[in-house]
Each structure stands twice: as structure tokens, then as C-alpha cells.
Image (cartoon, grey):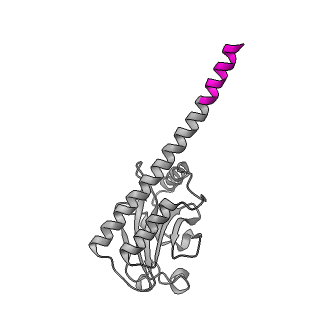
Amino acid sequence: MATFKSPQLELDRLANLDTYTIIDTLPEQQYDDITQLAAQICGMPISLISFIDQDRQWFKSRHGFPHLQTDRQLSFCTHAIQQPDKMMIVSDATQDVRFSENPLVYQEPKVVFYAGMPLVTEEGWALGTLCVIDNKPNQLTSAQAKSLTILARQVITLLSLRKKTESWSERRKMNGGSIACVRTWSIL
């Protein structure tokens, strides 16, 4: 398993992930549209939006992939988020020492090709990836890689909007309660 240089930084990353309240949420069409587009653009059978939690890799959206989550120790995306400023590409996982003995490579779903673009928040934290996967060795064209990067930014935009909407909604509830309280006192 990939390890982070600083356990404190990993704790801070996990705390930032928690602020988005995305883990274990229901599927949403906006995210599913992105994974479907990524698979089509890159010509891959599998595309995922993953978030790396403490012990698992959880999939907000999955196109062509049966599992809702995998163990973090098996996760390609755990490696990808360690270099948040660039896409991680594994052309042939059967030939890569990091992954050649990984059960996800030699058993179903047979992850052989992997390209993952880290999902980096406004605060600079890599929370997961938008990735595409093939069951055979492969490559991305420069146009496909650029498109995957653009789609990853759209995932971050959706996450940010979600967080801001929830924050606004919470403030509105709190303010509504205060207004009701003031009205009650003014009547008495």
C-alpha cells in the first residue's frame, strides 16, 4: 500500500474529505454522466469516481465496475493521490511491481490499464480520482488525457457546489430558528 510521508497530513486530508459529506451518499446523475463520458472519450470499459477514506476506496460513481468499494490497500487511486498535480498512468499493471500481485489485476475485474486524475479541492487536498480502466494494456492520447483532466475539474466543481449548498442550507436553518425566536419574544 502507498503510504503518505506525514501521518498528520493524511489525517488533515481525511478531515477535509469529511467536510464534503460525500462518502456513502446515493448515486447522482451528474457524477454518473461524468463517468460515462470519461469511459466513452477514453474508449475504456470502466470509469470511476473514487474517494479514498481511511481504510477503503469508495466509488461515488461507477461505469462498468461491479463493486461499491475496495480495500484501500488494493487501490490504484491511493497511489495516484500522492502526486496530486499529475495524472497517474499504468499502461500494464501485470508488468508494474506496485500492482502485478494485486488481486484486482489477476482476478476480476482484471485491472490492467489505469489512468487516474486526482480530484484536488480548492484547499489543495487530493480526495480521490476520476479514473478509467481497461482489461488490457493501453494508452491515452493527449486529447483523451486532457479530457479526463477537464472532467476531473468538473467533479471538483460538483463537490464544491454540494458543500456550499449544504453550508448555505445549514445557515438558513439556523437563521430561520433565530427569526422565529425573535418573533415569539416580540409577541409576548
Residue 97 is inside the magenta segment: no
The stretch of residues the image draws in magenta is 176-188
Question: Residue 66's spot in the image, x, y percent?
Answer: 57, 76
Question: Residue 73's spot in the image, x, y percent?
Answer: 55, 71
Question: Which residue is rendered at x = 57% and y = 60% of the image?
Answer: 54
Question: Which residue is rendered at x = 54% and y = 48% of the image?
Answer: 19
State whether residue 64 appears in this view.
Answer: yes
Q: In screen coordinates, is 160 left or right of 28?
A: left
Residue 41's place in the image compared with 85, above or below, is below
Give whichever of 93, 42 is nearer the camera.
42
Question: Which residue is rendered at x = 40% and y = 61% of the image?
Answer: 152
The picture quadrant where one finds residue 22 is: bottom right
Residue 105's place in the image compared with 25, above or below, is below
Residue 170's place in the image compared with 49, above or below, is above
Q: Main secondary structure of the magenta part?
A: helix
- Name the outermost residue toward the left: 142
